[in-house]
Image (cartoon, helix red, strand yellow):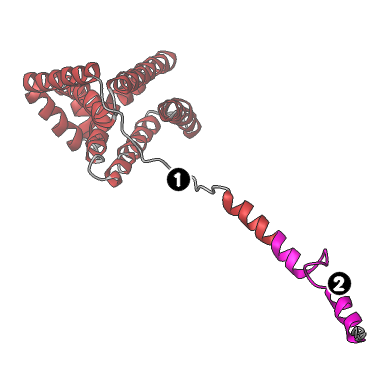
Amino acid sequence: MLQQSVHNPLDSLINNRNSYAPENYPYSPLSVIAEDSTITQAWNARKITSTTQPPVVFKAKTKGEQYADGCIVLFLIIFFLIASERIVEGFITAFKAALNLRKQFEADDELTLRTSRLITVAFVLPTVVFALCPSPTYFFIILTCTLGYLAVMSGFMAILDYVNHSTVFGFINRMRSNYVIIASVFLLLGKINMLWATLSAIPFIIFLAMASKVVLKNNFSVFFYILYICTLELLPAILVFRYILK
């Protein structure tokens, strides 16, 4: 006897439920999760690297640069040994006359002190530039710029004296040497601590104050002094330092 299949009314409900199962429904939460996992895998597959600053590597000096450094050091040592007495005298003169205008005139009138001061400047300028420059190339460039600046200033001062029939600006130009010597000491100490290097601006300020006394005592106007400061002191110095910093 054949058994007839019995129809169960719940089967239709089960089939309907299966038709709406997550795996059959195209927008089911499981399919969204599957898509998200695919995107996550694709994202993780990318190599995310953080850009870090490479360590600073100082370029070693070539044999030619080392040879040039040795020659400069040897020249400065020989220069100091030959003119040590004059150099010491120039330092003493510069510091004694820094805040005393009368001693400035006395040092300028005496030929020996003027010569010692000039020799001291000729020694301290290359010494400071060599101490601050990283290579002989920079040494020659900056030293040339500095000497050119001083030469141009001397020329302008001579023109001002010629036009005004005076010797005031020539004296101011020679008086500048005292403060160049003092500033060089602070710049050399700046190799130890940068605070000392910033103090090198103090001699320049004192020089401008002393120059104002000389100019005003010789019956030049305040407007003329301000014009002189802006055109012959501040502007050339700013241009030189801007070129050096480049």
- Magenta segment: 9-35
Category of crowding for the residue at label 2, using alpha-carbon neighbours closer than 10 angstroms: few (below 14), some (14–19), many (at least 20): few
**Which residue is the site of mark 1?**
52
Asked if one can make out residue 17 in the rendered structure from this viewpoint, the answer is yes
Look at the image and say whether residue 175 sits in the magenta stretch: no
Residue 153 located left or right of residue 183? right
Relative to the observer, which residue lies in front, 71 or 214?
A: 71
**Magenta region, mostly helix, strand or loop?**
helix
Nearer the observer: mark 1 or 2; the answer is 2
The residue sitting at the front extreme is 1
The quarter of the displayed image where residue 156 is located:
top left
Q: Position of residue 217 (x, y in %)?
A: 36, 32
Q: Position of residue 155 (x, y in %)?
A: 38, 14
Look at the image and say whether residue 30 sits in the magenta stretch: yes
- Residue found 51% across the figure and 47% down from its top: 49
The quarter of the displayed image where residue 119 is located:
top left
Q: Position of residue 157 (x, y in %)?
A: 38, 19
Q: Are marks 1 and 2 in contact (CB under 8 Å)?
A: no
N-term-proximal mark, 1 vs 2: 2
Kind of residue at disc 2: Ser
Residue 33 located left or right of residue 98? right
- Residue found 26% across the figure and 36% down from its top: 187
The quarter of the displayed image where residue 102 is located:
top left
Q: Which mark is residue 19?
A: 2
Q: Secondary structure at mark 2?
A: helix
Q: Position of residue 192 (x, y in %)?
A: 22, 43
